[in-house]
Image: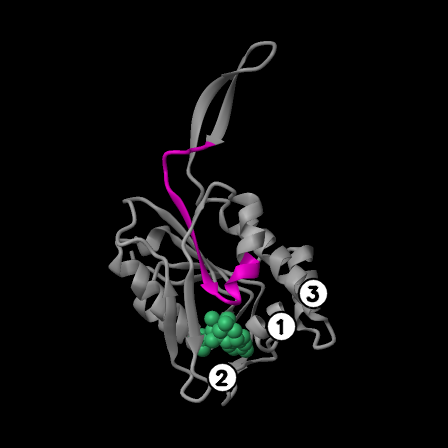
Amino acid sequence: MTLQLRVYVPPHPLIKHWLGVARDAATPSVLFKTAMTELGRWLTYEAVRDWLPTQDVTIDTPLATAPATLVNPEVPIAVVPVLRAGLALLEGAQTLLPLASVYHLGLVRDENTLEASCYLNKLPDQFAPETRVLITEPMLATGGSIMMTLAELEKRGVDPSLTRIISVVVAPPALQKIGAAYPGLVIYTATIDEFVNEQGFIVPGLGDAGDRTFGT
Ligand SMILES: O=P(O)(O)OC[C@H]1O[C@H](OP(=O)(O)OP(=O)(O)O)[C@H](O)[C@@H]1O
Ligand SMILES: O=c1cc[nH]c(=O)[nH]1
Ligand SMILES: [Mg+2]
């Protein structure tokens, strides 16, 4: 079987709504952050549907026994937010995955070369086998930052087939790079945009996600 990158754009009215709010240049920073947090919540909701490990058990209700399906607490769940912009998506994701471990990765692009570099790496030396990793990274533009993230995870034993990315705006150059190196990876995003301009911004995009989230 040939593996292929899968990119899902869930047709959810709340995802469409908050994307519209985030795209609008007139949206103030505080509302932009709310939009990113809400997108983190709803994209996580969609992304974990067939990814979160469950177990079938029997429980005692106040009246009788009943079968139940619970989230399996023995399978490790990790969220990796790519700073800074991935922090607001993380907030939304955490409302659904409150017990997940959070490993921060701080990356920044050089404004001229557009190359990403790492200034904070809180990843463990090795992830436990079977760990599900959810990456929160709202902008996949040239793909430099997400490729660095995926390489750091792979070095630490993460299985790409158990990894999901939630993003907000993704662009063709990033998708081409991810698809070539990690076929089988799954991305949930609010939109796939047209292109990346010479300054490295996605068009039509939403501008600088980190600056708009934090008002800088
Ligand atoms: O696909 P790429 O071309 O690598 O671009 C995507 C990255 O660019 C932005 O980060 P930025 O460097 O602006 O840092 P910030 O989140 O702190 O603003 C964005 O948050 C992504 O991490
Ligand atoms: O459009 C873009 C591209 C990369 N990073 C951003 O924040 N915005
Ligand atoms: Mg930025």
- Of labels 2 and 3, earlier in sequence is 3
Q: Is residue 107 above or below residue 164?
A: below
Q: Which residues are magenta?
A: 71-89
Residue at image location 26% in from the left, 56% down from the top? 156
**Could you say where residue 46 lies in the image, as x and y percent from the top left?**
55, 50
Is label 1 within 8 A of ligand 2 (CB to nearest ligand atom)? yes
Residue located beneath label 2 in the image: 200
How far apart in space, not on screen, are marks 2 and 1 (Cα)?
A: 16 Å
Q: Is residue 115 left or right of residue 44?
A: left
Residue at image location 42% in from the left, 59% down from the top? 104
- The answer to whether residue 86 of the structure is visible from this angle is yes
> Is 82 part of what is drawn in magenta?
yes
**Could you say where residue 86 lies in the image, as x and y percent from the top left?**
51, 63
Q: Is residue 174 above or below residue 86?
A: below
Is label 2 within 8 A of ligand 1 (CB to nearest ligand atom)? yes
Residue located beneath label 1 in the image: 212
Query: Of discs 2 and 3, which sits in the foreground?
Result: 3
Query: Of discs 2 and 1, which sits in the foreground?
Result: 1
Residue at image location 35% in from the left, 58% down from the top? 184
Residue located beneath label 3 in the image: 30
Instruction: Look at the numbered disc 3 and give the secondary structure of its residue.
Output: helix
Instruction: Look at the numbered disc 2 and give the secondary structure of its residue.
Output: loop
**Could you say where residue 108 lies in the image, as x and y percent from the top left?**
44, 75
- What is the three-letter code of the residue carrying label 2? Gly
Q: Are marks 2 and 3 in contact (CB under 8 Å)?
A: no
Q: Quadrant of the N terminus?
A: bottom left
Q: Is residue 87 above or below residue 26?
A: above
